[in-house]
């Protein structure tokens, strides 16, 4: 369950006071939730020293890792003297101390750890030094190894009201939905047109992810070609393919959640609710609320939730979309 930042801090303070504070937390939520600001507040709270920013905490002995170089990856590193790597964190977490004897480490954009780095980090996660607090910050926690996810306590953050920023592909979907509010609905042709628009957004999303991941891979090839064998290259190719698919599935889920938020706002408008997930589009969702019967809206939401569930299986994506959009918007 996501929390506002202040509420999440209250819960952590309560855990500390009750002697139930964990040694490792995964801070998640959209980028608008300002993970780094929250992490600095957590360190302020736990250590009792008001520093305010992660940069200031670095000056007080905290270890802060961020994605490095053009590839924006956090790597395992060659040894403990390789700054910004997991090997560096492993070495320094045993040698440095923040105020009051705390050993602090923050990994920004933790999902950018490559598989080797994640596996290496498990040792520190499982056997941390005494008085250690590890914070992993991530907008895409599902990209972390299950073994990491199972060993941390997740704190899911909600963004401040009115600060949500949409991705390019989310913006395209919102445009399609806004245009839908201006048209007549309830026909097979309308449903298939909406399905076609949604598929085009998914295709563009997949192409963008593939382009980014392959560009990262090309840069890695240039760097490692002369120092590794062909086995590494083959393994890395497989990892890139898996990463493309993982990124796509995660962002497809975000698009489905946005579609459900839109339909939820239609239902909220019909019920006279004050809170809307997408207040900037309240005129468009109000138009649909006036056009559709409440029972039809409930049916559409139910069918879309079924689609969301089916997309987490091995179902054929195109067929699942066609069946769902016809059932949801074809009548």
Image (tube, grey):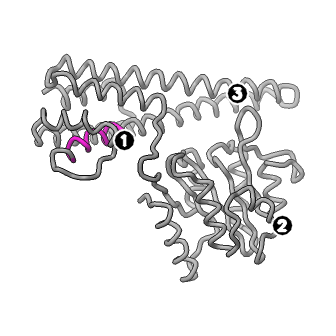
Q: Name the residue tied to disc 2.
A: 96
Residue 36: tell me if it is visible: yes
Q: Name the residue tied to disc 1.
A: 257
**Mark 1 or 3: the one toward you:** 1
Q: Where residue 210 sits: x, y (%)?
A: 58, 25
Residue 316: tell me if it is visible: no
Q: Residue at x 32, y 25 (%)?
A: 176
The Cα–Cα distance between marks 1 and 2, rounded to whole angstroms, is 43 Å
Instruction: Identify whether 168 is placed above or below 271.
Output: above
Q: Name the residue tied to disc 3.
A: 217
Q: Where residue 263 sits: x, y (%)?
A: 25, 39
Closest to the observer, 7 or 90: 7
Q: Secondary structure at mark 1?
A: helix
Q: Which residues are magenta?
A: 258-268
- The quadrant holding residue 241 is top right
Residue extending farthest to the right is: 81
* Disc 1: CA contacts within 10 A as few (<14), some (14-19) or many (>=20): some
Q: Residue at x 69, y 42 (%)?
A: 114
């Amino acid at each position: 369950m996501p929390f506002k930042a202040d509420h999440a801090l209250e819960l952590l303070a309560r855990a500390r006071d009750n002697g139930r504070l964990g040694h490792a937390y995964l801070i998640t939520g959209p980028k608008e939730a300002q993970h780094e600001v929250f992490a600095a507040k957590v360190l302020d709270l736990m250590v009792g020293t008001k520093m305010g920013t992660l940069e200031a905490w670095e000056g007080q002995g905290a270890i802060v890792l961020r994605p490095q170089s053009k590839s924006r990856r956090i790597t395992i590193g060659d040894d403990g003297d390789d700054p910004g790597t997991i090997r560096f964190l492993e070495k320094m977490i045993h040698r440095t101390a923040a105020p009051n004897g705390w050993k602090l480490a923050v990994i920004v954009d933790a999902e950018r750890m490559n598989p080797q780095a994640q596996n290496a980090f498990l040792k520190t996660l499982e056997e941390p030094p005494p008085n250690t607090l590890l914070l992993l910050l991530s907008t895409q926690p599902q990209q972390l190894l299950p073994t990491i996810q199972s060993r941390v306590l997740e704190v899911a953050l909600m963004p401040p009201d009115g600060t949500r920023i949409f991705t390019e592909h989310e913006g395209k979907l919102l445009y399609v939905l806004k245009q839908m509010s201006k048209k007549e609905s309830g026909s097979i042709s309308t449903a298939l047109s909406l399905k076609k628009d949604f598929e085009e957004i998914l295709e563009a999303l997949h192409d963008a992810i593939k382009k980014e991941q392959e560009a990262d891979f090309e840069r890695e090839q240039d760097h490692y070609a002369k120092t590794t064998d062909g086995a590494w290259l083959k393994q890395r190719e497989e990892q890139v393919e898996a990463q493309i698919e993982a990124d796509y599935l995660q962002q497809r889920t975000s698009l489905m959640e946005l579609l459900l938020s839109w339909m939820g706002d239609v239902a909220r408008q019909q019920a006279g609710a004050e809170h809307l997930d997408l207040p900037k589009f309240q005129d468009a969702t109000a138009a649909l609320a006036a056009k559709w019967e409440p029972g039809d809206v409930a049916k559409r939401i139910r069918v879309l939730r079924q689609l969301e569930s089916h997309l987490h299986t091995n179902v054929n994506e195109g067929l699942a979309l066609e069946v769902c959009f016809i059932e949801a918007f074809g009548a």
